[in-house]
Image (cartoon, rainbow, N blue to C red):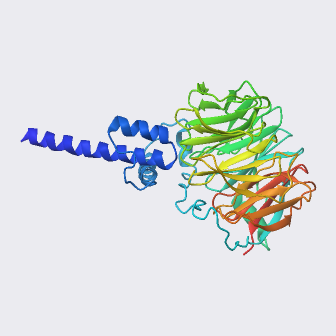
Amino acid sequence: MDNNKNNSNSWEDGKLMRHLNSLIVAHLRHNNLIQAATAVASATMIPLNVDVPPNKLIQLVAKGLAVEKDDVLRGTSSSLFGDLNASLPVAPQPSTTAVDFSAVLDTKGVSKSFPKHETRHLSEHKNIARCAKFSPDGKFVATGSADTSIKLFEVSKINQMLLPDTKDGPVRPVVRTFYDHIQPINDLDFHPQGTILVSGAKDQTIKFFDISKAIAKRANRVIQDTHNVRSVSFHPSGDFLLAGTDHAIPHLYDINTFQCYLSANTPEVGPNGAINQVRYSSTGAVYVTASKNGAIQLWDGITANCVRSITGAHGTAEATSAIFTKDQRFVLSCGKDSTIKLWDVGSGRLVKQYVGAIHTQLRCQAIFNETEEFVLSIDEMTNEIVIWDAMTTEKVAKWPSNHAGAPRWLEHSPVESAFISCGTDRSIRFWKESL
């Protein structure tokens, strides 16, 4: 009887393992990691073209993490940040309704209208406002400046400012100001599950700030890098942090040990290979770098190997930003050649191009709105915010930025129709859809 039971359990375990391997193969194949998918398929004797819904593994992992989070909230956390993980909600899972840019690659449709927004001046730094970042749940937004300070805003208080009648007097949306760097701040990112904000700066450091502590003004942890830290990006798990620096290879840090990893398989890099921006995809399966030499490079999120290099993506001009679409099948890049381009991750092919805005001097950003229906960027010559229909590439709006001088950074909320602009005039403005 026991033998039959053991045999039955082994058979069920085998079925479960085969199903898991099928999900892994399908996930890797769908995310264009063909070499990895082929290796797993061969090792596990799973057909490479196994018929499994492409997002099934992500959906199951998301459900498992939600259950695990419930367990953690009922007990005690043993993670790096202790009970801070319970202070902020878990970041929203990647949307399954992301725009499929491959569906109508070669057709022109009717462009959508970008909704009108109202804007409000929030605050000013004492020097150029160089970067901004929303928290994954959209509840906070932080800005970093050449004056070495970081301002943290609570979005609910910003929204309160926008109300026509504020009965309780003036609202102060700045809830923290951090001072700990000694040179200008280049980039910011929030931990995906906790109350930790990280900053990268010209002083060659990455600093960790605990935004849950009301009186904290300095970092509680510091990574000393060897180069000017131009960009930072958390892995979706929160366990790893990428740093794009003056070095041509991304620096990958384990945030529990601060050990730094460098890829052993690196592409040939010419002069000016410094990384302007590094960003993880929504699942962490791949990350992208935009470099001063105009290259866009894609890196395997597990092996840290460069899997695709698009040299001269913006000619000889700098590539100033690069971000993934939600389904991580495409990358949107911006360059000092005054173009914004959408690239197919799997083939490296140019899919779409958004033109009509001049940006040749500043480290401008090109971003999607929260639904990925529109692309936003800056025209330095006219000091306007320019919006394109993401699918048709038609320019659908040009708005005065209301900055004294062109903004150098745009950052959109991940959860609502709102964005931040900041730049050379030191000011920070909040934009929100008018109801």
Q: Is residue 48 above or below residue 266?
A: below
Identify which residue, 194 or 416, lies in the foreground: 416
Q: In screen coordinates, is 289 left or right of 179?
A: left
Q: Is residue 8 visible?
A: yes
Measuring 73% from the left and 32% from the top, which residue is drawn there?
245
Identify which residue, 347 or 147, lies in the foreground: 347
Q: Classify the position of the N terminus by image quarter.
A: top left
As drawn, the residue found furthest toward the front would be 106
Q: Is residue 355 above or below residue 205?
A: below
Q: Is residue 268 above or below residue 33?
A: above
Identify which residue, 54 or 233, lies in the foreground: 54
Identify which residue, 317 or 88, lies in the foreground: 317
Tell me where residue 257 appears, x and y as whole percent.
57, 26
Q: Quadrant of residue 156?
A: bottom right
Q: Quadrant of residue 110?
A: bottom right
Query: Number of labelled discs?
Result: 0
Q: Quadrant of residue 269?
A: top right
Tell me where residue 181 appears, x and y as whole percent.
79, 33
Q: Classify the position of the C terminus by image quarter.
A: bottom right
Q: Is residue 213 visible?
A: no
Measuring 77% from the left and 63% from the top, which residue is drawn there?
387
Q: In screen coordinates, is 355 left or right of 300?
A: right
As drawn, the residue found furthest toward the left would be 1
Measuring 47% from the left and 44% from the top, which residue is drawn there?
28
Tell me where residue 176 appears, x and y as whole percent.
75, 47
Q: In screen coordinates, is 316 left or right of 107?
A: right
